[in-house]
Image: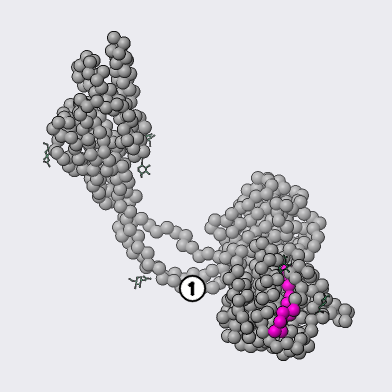
């Protein structure tokens, strides 16, 4: 008996499915298999299931860190076979499956799902694993779907392999791609590639390719320079670098034993289809590809280093995944995308692994160019044919209309307060207008209500426009309490906004506080901070001048500074200093 299954195992181990096989190397798979032990099965049917499960386990890489498989026999009750971590080699699993026998039970899949959910899936899968229930059956009868529904709701994938037609399971499977109907138990092994491609999708969902995690790998420094490496898939057995799916290269992680740079390369057979230079400063590093790099199934990653290869290596690795076939050339020279390189004559490096890991995710299709700025509303009617890295094509029609982002005056409307005793030239605000569609913007003072010659819009620094109170202005709170000044700016488009100038009665006593508009002006003013300070200082002057103490001072209207245009903070604040000292002097008298 024992001899028998071992020889069977040897024979079946040659039934490897190359293209998408061993995808369990690149993901953590927790699979619960429900095998049929109802009375409708013959003992040969049971043996066919057993050999299939054994082959499947080998091809999706049964391993403690990779694929774990549990088994439950199902008639119209469930028979616990083994748990996810009970058998971690295909030989052990095959030995365990030898005593699976037919029962005299009728067929009902429900108890199998109950046991799969309650005893295994709900509490003993690994964090981050991709979880599956794979059902081998010759019935579609389910007395209850409670556990099936819970399993699907938990994001666990459910697939069926059955002698009945696929349509019998449409509402049970988590995806119609996960149903293989109309099988014959005797020829089940020929369906192995189909079942593998259910579990190992042709699109990379998010798979990592590495021998050992680079950050925890013990490495030595390479001594080769002008060297190229080519991470070919192993010619036999599981391979860390078998790119079994298509998608997009999103990142590469590596541990550099020395600093230096290398050119990461993507090969399609022996043609270079992509390369980029990555600088390694030493130690564990991650390079993120932006945009991501399209990868087809069976592409090969490699790299070229003109100087000493910085990526750390281990030269006597052991275990199933220890690479035997990585290719090396020590006189490679730099290449261009599109170049052919004959890797067939390159030598291989047995028992050698590098501290490198790459992540391939689902591919994306993106439009890479931005549309031109036309300054007018412009429609585009695009019909695109797109092809992804899996060579699937699709056509799509997209209508895009570009519109002009309008001109904006960013710091109006606003309100400015000014004492009615001010009659020297004063900057009130610098207009901040933006128009992305225009090279230049011009602003005019379009109206003042009530009409007056006290204000003007004039050039300020660096081509900006400022609103000024004119020298010799005659303001009087009793006549006009506020002016509403409209300003129109024109770039590619035109817009009007306004500011309100509120006139303060100089005879009113107001304790000094920094007015809200001055604080606001710090935020909105275009001018230098100096301009804003000038306004604040100016207010201090005005308000001090209107306090009771100031009333007893010599008439300030006679001060020569009143007649001098003021355009900088220093002057403004000089006045305050002087006024303050004069006030203090008055106070002391
Ligand atoms: C089959 O054999 C295993 C040990 O190899 C044992 O634990 C299990 O109970 C047996 N199952 C049946 C149904 O006899
Ligand atoms: C999961 O739950 C079942 C049923 O409650 C229990 O028998 C089993 O020991 C649990 N497994 C783990 C790993 O906690
Ligand atoms: C795009 O514009 C064309 C022409 O106006 C129109 O026939 C078509 O329906 C539009 N397509 C979409 C998706 O709006
Ligand atoms: C405002 O006054 C100026 C100068 O006196 C004059 O030229 C202009 O026409 C007046 N505007 C309006 C709208 O009355
Ligand atoms: C004016 O522009 C020049 C050069 O762009 C710049 O150095 C200077 O700081 C600007 N002045 C102000 C007040 O923004
Ligand atoms: C003008 O306003 C815009 C929008 O609020 C702002 O981003 C920009 O910094 C302002 N410019 C200046 C010089 O303050």
Query: Residue 518 location in percent, x, y?
Result: 32, 34
Q: Which residues are magenta?
A: 68-79
Query: Residue 102 location in percent, x, y?
Result: 77, 86
> As rendered, which of 14 and 384 lies closer to the eye?
14
Q: Is residue 580 left or right of residue 81?
A: left
Q: Quadrant of residue 293?
A: bottom right
- Which part of the image, by quadrant, shows the N terminus? bottom right
Q: Classify mark 1: residues with Cα within 10 Å, few (<14), some (14-19) or many (20+).
A: few
Q: Is residue 169 visible?
A: yes
Indicate whether 359 appears above or below 84. above
Q: Is residue 160 left or right of residue 391?
A: right
- Which part of the image, by quadrant, shows the C terminus? top left
Query: Residue 475 location in percent, x, y?
Result: 17, 30
Q: Which residue is mark 1?
A: 394
Residue 69 among magenta residues: yes
Residue at 76%, 65% in the rendered image: 64
Residue at 69%, 56% in the rendered image: 356
Q: Which residue extends farthest top?
A: 589
Indicate whether 402 appears above or below 505. below
Q: Quadrant of residue 535?
A: top left
Picture quadrant of ligand 1: bottom right
Q: Is residue 566 left or right of residue 271?
A: left
Residue at 68%, 86% in the rendered image: 107
Indicate whether 209 appears above or below 120. above
Residue 335 among magenta residues: no
Magenta span main SS: strand
Q: What sort of colour scheme is used for the picture?
A: one colour
């Amino acid at each position: 008996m024992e001899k028998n299954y071992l020889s069977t195992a040897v024979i079946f181990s040659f039934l490897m499915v190359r293209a998408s096989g061993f995808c369990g190397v690149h993901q953590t798979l927790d699979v619960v298999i429900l095998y049929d032990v109802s009375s409708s099965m013959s003992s040969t049917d049971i043996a066919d299931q057993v050999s299939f499960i054994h082959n499947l386990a080998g091809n999706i890489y049964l391993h403690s860190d990779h694929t774990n498989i549990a088994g439950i026999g199902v008639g119209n009750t469930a028979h616990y076979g083994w748990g996810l971590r009970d058998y971690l080699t295909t030989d052990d699993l095959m030995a365990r499956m030898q005593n699976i026998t037919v029962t005299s039970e009728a067929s009902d899949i429900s108890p199998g799902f109950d046991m799969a959910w309650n005893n295994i899936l709900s509490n003993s899968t690994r964090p981050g694993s991709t979880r599956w229930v794979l059902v081998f059956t010759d019935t579609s009868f389910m007395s209850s779907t409670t556990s099936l529904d819970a399993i699907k709701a938990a994001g666990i994938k459910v697939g069926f392999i059955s002698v009945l037609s696929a349509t019998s399971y449409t509402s049970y499977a988590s995806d119609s791609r996960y149903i293989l109907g109309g099988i014959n138990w005797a020829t089940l092994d020929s369906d192995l590639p189909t079942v593998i491609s259910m579990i190992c999708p042709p699109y990379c969902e998010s798979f990592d390719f590495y021998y050992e995690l680079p950050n925890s790998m013990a490495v030595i420094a390479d001594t080769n320079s002008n060297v190229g490496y080519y991470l070919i898939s192993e010619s036999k057995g599981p391979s860390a670098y078998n790119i079994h799916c298509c998608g997009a290269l999103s990142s590469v992680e590596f541990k550099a034993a020395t600093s230096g740079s290398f050119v990461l390369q993507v090969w399609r057979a022996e043609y270079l289809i992509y390369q980029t230079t990555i600088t390694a400063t030493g130690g564990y590093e991650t390079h993120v590809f932006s945009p991501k790099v399209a990868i087809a199934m069976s592409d090969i990653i490699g790299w070229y280093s003109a100087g000493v290869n910085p990526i750390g290596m281990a030269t006597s690795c052991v275990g199933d995944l220890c690479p035997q076939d990585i290719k090396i050339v020590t006189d490679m020279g730099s290449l261009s995308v599109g170049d052919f390189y004959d890797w067939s004559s390159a030598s291989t490096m047995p028992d050698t692994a590098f501290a490198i890991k790459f992540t391939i995710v689902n591919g994306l299709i993106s439009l890479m160019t931005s549309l031109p700025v036309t300054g007018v509303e412009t429609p585009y009617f695009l019909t695109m044919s797109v092809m992804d890295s899996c060579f699937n094509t699709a056509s799509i029609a997209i209508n895009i209309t570009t519109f002009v982002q309008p001109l904006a005056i960013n710091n109006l409307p606003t309100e400015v307060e000014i004492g009615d005793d001010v009659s020297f030239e004063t900057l009130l605000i610098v207009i901040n207008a933006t128009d992305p569609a225009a090279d230049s913007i011009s602003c005019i003072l379009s109206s003042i209500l009530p009409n007056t010659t006290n204000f003007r819009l004039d050039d300020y620094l660096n081509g900006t426009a400022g609103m000024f109170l004119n020298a010799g202005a005659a303001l009087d709170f009793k006549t006009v309490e506020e002016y509403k000044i409209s300003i129109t700016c024109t770039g590619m488009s035109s817009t009007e906004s306004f500011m309100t100038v509120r006139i303060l009665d100089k005879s009113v006593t107001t304790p000094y506080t920094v007015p809200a508009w001055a604080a606001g002006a710090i935020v909105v003013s275009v001018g230098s901070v100096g301009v804003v300070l000038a306004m604040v200082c100016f207010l201090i002057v005005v308000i001090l001048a209107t306090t009771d103490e100031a009333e007893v001072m010599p008439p300030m209207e006679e001060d020569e500074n009143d007649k001098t245009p003021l355009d900088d903070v220093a002057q403004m604040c000089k006045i305050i200093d002087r006024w303050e000292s004069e006030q203090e002097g008055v106070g002391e008298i």
